[in-house]
Image (cartoon, rainbow, N blue to C red):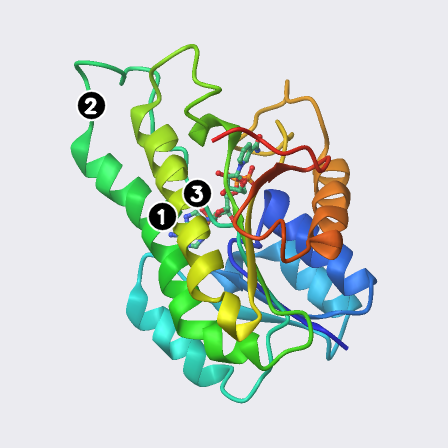
């Protein structure tokens, strides 16, 4: 049974990824900041005893990432999904009102932590059958797509994440590891809001297809949940 390691699974897209992979027969290491309070995830774990386990992980706390590595030592990891993310921009923000502390925080969670996860788990990923690292990015990180400005914190952290993914794809190719950045669509979650265009089910079903079909030629690319390549 293949293994998935995923961050930010107590709600939204991460919860749905955990559900769909568990239902597909995968072993899921589901990470979230506060497993004790993650009711929906605990319910899911109860439906998949022995195959879905909860792990405490604040991705901004690198000691916790090291602790998780010790906990999962010896496990092969077929797929790492760096899903945890924060929006961080506020309606009162924008040019002239940048919250620089919030920017550092957004960079830590959205950009630095995914690289730290990849560095920490690369050996275990290299030992697996499928050998894939997926970072959940956003079209808002596409420079070509930016026609409305603003959102400095989120846009820049995701654009930088895309560059992390590109370098990972080059550095880890000799170990057979593929890496890709995925845009999940505009999704009905706490972050996406109620007016978003697609459900978590549609988004994750699409991304699972893209992940399954990812080839070495596509490694280092930026794709939407429907498989379309997104310009940088
Ligand atoms: P939600 O806001 O619904 O969920 C975000 C998840 O990330 C939560 O589980 C949250 O945990 C977790 N998280 C935040 N900070 C940390 C941290 N420091 N350590 C661990 N976990 C953390 O967002 P979505 O599910 O919509 O977003 C998932 C990913 O998809 C993100 O990377 C986001 O940027 C991206 N995305 C989403 C879009 C959308 O339309 N929804 C569009 C484009 C990209 P907690 O509950 O503890 O805060």
From the viewer's perspective, is 115 left or right of 176? left
Quarter-of-image position of residue 197: top right
Q: CA distance from mark 2 to mark 1?
A: 18 Å
Q: Residues within 10 Å of mark 2 (few under 14, many from 20)?
A: some
First-in-chain label (2 vs 3):
2
Place of residue 228 in the rendered image (x, y in percent of width and height, measured from the top left): 68, 33
Q: CA distance from mark 2 to mark 3?
A: 22 Å
Residue at horizontal 75 percent and vertical 41 percent from the top = 206
Residue at horizontal 39 percent and vertical 69 percent from the top = 119
Place of residue 212 in the rendered image (x, y in percent of width and height, measured from the top left): 74, 56
Q: According to the image, label 2 marks what residue?
A: 98
Q: According to the image, label 1 marks what residue?
A: 111
Q: Is residue 127 above or below residue 46?
A: below
Q: CA distance from mark 3 to mark 1?
A: 9 Å
First-in-chain label (2 vs 1):
2
Q: Residues within 10 Å of mark 3 (few under 14, many from 20)?
A: many
Secondary structure of the residue carrying tag 3 is helix
Q: Are marks 3 and 1 in contact (CB under 8 Å)?
A: no
Q: Are marks 2 and 1 in contact (CB under 8 Å)?
A: no
Secondary structure of the residue carrying tag 2 is loop
Q: Is residue 42 above or below residue 111?
A: below
Quadrant where the image shows the N terminus:
bottom right
- Comparing marks 2 and 1, which lies closer to the viewer? 1
From the viewer's perspective, is 210 left or right of 143? right
Place of residue 72 in the rendered image (x, y in percent of width and height, measured from the top left): 51, 82
Residue 162: image tag: 3
Q: Is residue 88 above or below residue 84?
A: above
Q: Is residue 190 visible?
A: yes
- Comparing marks 2 and 3, which lies closer to the viewer? 3
Q: Nearer the viewer, residue 46 or 103?
A: 103
- Comparing marks 3 and 1, which lies closer to the viewer? 3
């Amino acid at each position: 049974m293949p293994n998935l390691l995923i961050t930010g699974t107590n709600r939204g897209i991460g919860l749905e990824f955990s559900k769909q992979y568990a239902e597909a027969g995968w072993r899921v290491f589901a990470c979230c900041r506060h497993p004790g309070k993650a009711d929906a995830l605990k319910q899911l774990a109860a439906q998949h005893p022995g195959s879905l386990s909860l792990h405490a992980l604040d991705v901004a706390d690198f000691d916790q990432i090291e602790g998780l590595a010790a906990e999962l030592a010896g496990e092969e990891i077929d797929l790492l999904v760096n899903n945890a993310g924060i929006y961080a921009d506020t309606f009162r923000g924008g040019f002239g009102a940048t919250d620089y502390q919030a920017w550092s925080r957004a960079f830590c969670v959205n950009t630095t932590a995914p690289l730290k996860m990849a560095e920490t788990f690369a050996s275990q990923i290299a030992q697996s059958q499928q050998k894939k690292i997926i970072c959940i990015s956003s079209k808002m990180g596409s420079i070509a797509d930016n026609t409305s400005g603003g959102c400095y914190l989120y846009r820049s952290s995701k654009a930088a994440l895309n560059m992390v993914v590109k370098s990972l794809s080059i550095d880890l190719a000799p170990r057979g590891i593929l890496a890709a950045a995925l845009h999940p669509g505009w999704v009905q979650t706490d972050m996406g809001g109620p007016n978003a265009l697609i459900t978590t089910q549609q988004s994750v079903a699409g991304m699972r297809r893209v992940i399954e079909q990812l080839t070495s030629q596509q490694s280092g690319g930026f794709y939407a949940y429907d498989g379309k390549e997104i310009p940088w």
